[in-house]
Image (cartoon, grey):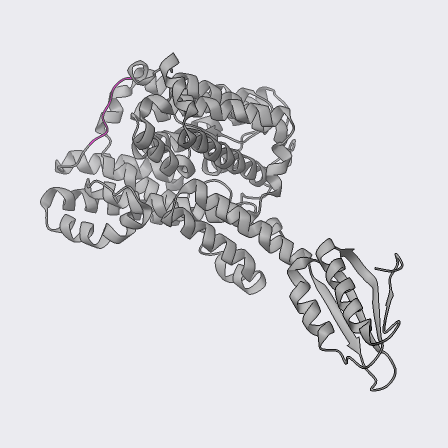
Amino acid sequence: MNTLKGRVSRPGSAGPPGPAPTPVTGPGLSALRQDLPASLVVFLVALPLCVGVAVASGVPAELGLVTGIVGGIVVGALPGSSLQVSGPAAGLTVLVLEAVRAYGLAALGVIVLATGLLQLLMGALRWGRWFRAISVSVVEGMLAGIGLVLIAGQLYSLTGAEAPAAGLDKIAGLPGMLIEALGSPGPRASLLLGAGTIAVLVLWKRLPKKVRAVPAPLAAVALATLASAALSLPVAKVEVRGLLDSVRLPGADDFASLVSVGVLGTVLAFTLIASAESLFSAAAVDRMHEGRRTDYDKELMAQGVGNTVCGILGALPMTAVIVRSAANVQAGARTKASRVMHGVWLLLFAALLPGALALIPLPALAAVLVHAGGKLVPLRSLPPLWRDHRGEVVILGVTAVSIVAISMFEGVLIGLALAVAKTAWEASHVRLEVQDTGRGPVRARLSGNATFLRLPRILDTLESLPSDRPIELDLAGLHHLDHACRTALENWSARHSACGPERVTVTSTGGRI
């Protein structure tokens, strides 16, 4: 956990640590003057991401806007984190797509509703703070695995091709898909449009500051839309159903899916990932300003309320999103009014300009998510982490590979198990010092934590000591001696003393073994 201090700013969609801390003050006219423009900035950042995450998740584009609206108006008004902004996140895209494919769109609302209720329960039990104890390497491995699967899947969407279901199949099929796309006019145009969108996203930060006032995702999607229309490119566009037509309240029959073990596992995965991503994002946002710190239990309950409402509306699950939250802080927001107003702007757009969505080319949205997926893979932090904490890199890598090769839920469980095993191994550090002058008793001193994990090494050393000499075993330096080690030391002492009385003398703070 020594890596937490320097790397806690990467929990959500992988944004950079913020600028110099910004003070946060109470409500007032001066605060509103800063919150209003900040809310517009967050709205412009959130709009293409809400639509893109929805399309990539296999649901109507409007459902992404619904989740963004709830994240702004409902969660934004609740206590927890002052400046953190919630909405649909790229980190859950892969899992949502798998859930929709396996159980249908009708079951999504029930799954999200159950996730929200579970988050409310955990918040009421004050479990929010415990999510801070999750290994950072597991969280980053989880996000890296999600990012790799997201990139692989959205590369197919760049050409309009159907992506395989399994993560390894997605990666293995990429060369053939790209070769096939380059040989066909339609897919080639779609691929080039997506590549151009990615280029805009990557190069946008190098443009003059006045130009960068427009958020990169919005600029990239807008330019791709203009290019598609001007050149009459044969690319697919977003399908528009209308906000009310996309909302579907769960029926009584939909709740029957909760008896399925697979659905319950999906609920647990949603809960774990959404909660961890939100609370790690809150920790990052707290480092960006000097205002009130996050109450993790209240923030978890706020996320639970949001997901409960999204579940009732049949929308996407939500998390706190570091990209939008960082944009909110950097734009000078001072109160929660900025995130509430950003939800209002999303609602007005969805109600007044729904037809504008039909102009957006799907390759542009896929490119936005490819770029977002790349940010989830912590390539820059790996070399210094490898130099200082190689075990953490192993946990990160195993978690990511397991998610790609097996599934999200199993990959996270494997990462958690590996982190616990690593901690147990490090906590069982023990030192055995032997002093042998060549005559008289041999002195052996154990210090640290003697557990069964280190027992083979301890016994190998003790059994190599001379069998015809007295042994003085000093256990005073031990902080912990578990039952397995105690029993093994007793047996070794008995065997060594078989040649005569008191062949082994044991001293410890507690007396005899």
| Residue 239 among magenta residues | yes
Q: From the viewer's perspective, is residue 458 above or below residue 396? A: below
The answer to whether one can see residue 146 in this image is: yes
Residue at left 16%, top 53%? 179
- Locate residue 210, reporting x and y percent: 40, 40
Residue 386 left/right relative to 127: left
Q: Which SS does the magenta portion mostly show?
A: loop
Please tell me which residue lies in front, 442 or 80: 442
Q: Which residue is drawn at 51% across and 42% down?
A: 11
- For this view, does 238 lie left or right of residue 411? left
* Residue 77 left/right relative to 355: right
Tell me if I can see residue 33 in this picture.
Answer: no
Q: Residue at x 18, y 53 (%)?
A: 176
Residue at left 76%, top 56%?
A: 481
Q: Is residue 377 above or below residue 21?
A: below
Query: Image check: 134 left or right of 503?
Result: left
Nearer the observer, 503 or 89: 503
Image quarter in which the C terminus is found: bottom right
Residue 475 forms part of the magenta stretch:
no
- Residue 392 screen position, x and y as percent: 55, 56
Percent of width and height locating residue 412: 48, 44
The residues colored magenta run 237-242
